Image: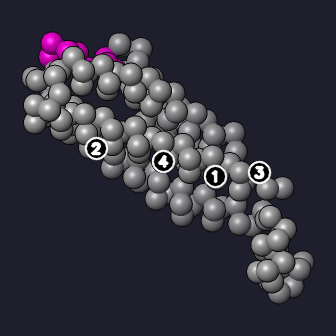
Amino acid sequence: MYWDLILWIIALFFNISLLAILLYQIICLSDLEADYMNPYESSSKINQLVVPEFVLQGVFCALFLLSGHRFMFLVTLPLAVYHARLFARRAHLLDVTEVFRALNHEKKYRIIKLAVYLFFFFLVIVRYPADSVSTLSIFSSEHGELDIRSSFLEF
């Protein structure tokens, strides 16, 4: 009955985690650009987070498929497929020897991914509860008027 609420909280947590991982990667690249970090340290910190980010985004996409939210699944699917292709071609890791040559490209790539994750965040905040509201019994017309105090205590 309250699975949609639990799944929404899980999706929100996954999305916030993806945003935090990506912001940390952008900060590492900015520190590398400003010579606060050496390339080995920056590359190793970023590479440690790439695979967990890909897995988390894949689970995020699968969560929408399993919960029956087809629109959200179709929105998140292209990025999951792109991550799977990068991983299969072994092009997902940042190369230490080429890091300065690809620094601007990597920053732009991660800023675009940040925009995509922010778009996902907006959709999770707005669309996911809107689809799930009709399934909650406290909002159905059986109860007549909505009493916020009693419905809050039911949770």
> Looking at the picture, how far across and down is residue 130, in whole percent?
63, 65
Q: Name the amino acid, label 3.
A: Trp
Give the residue pinned by disc 1.
Answer: 9
Q: Earlier in the sequence, mark 4 or mark 3?
A: 3
Give the residue pinned by disc 2.
Answer: 112
Vertical position of residue 70 compared to residue 30: above or below: below
Separation of residues labelled 1 and 2 (CA atoms): 25 Å
Inspect this view and state whether residue 105 appears.
Answer: no
Q: Name the amino acid, label 4.
A: Ile
Q: Name the amino acid, label 1.
A: Ile
On the rendered structure, is 1 left or right of 34?
A: right
> Looking at the picture, how far across and down is residue 99, in whole percent?
16, 21
Q: Earlier in the sequence, mark 1 or mark 2?
A: 1
Vertical position of residue 18 compared to residue 84: above or below: below
Separation of residues labelled 1 and 3 (CA atoms): 10 Å
Q: Earlier in the sequence, mark 1 or mark 3?
A: 3
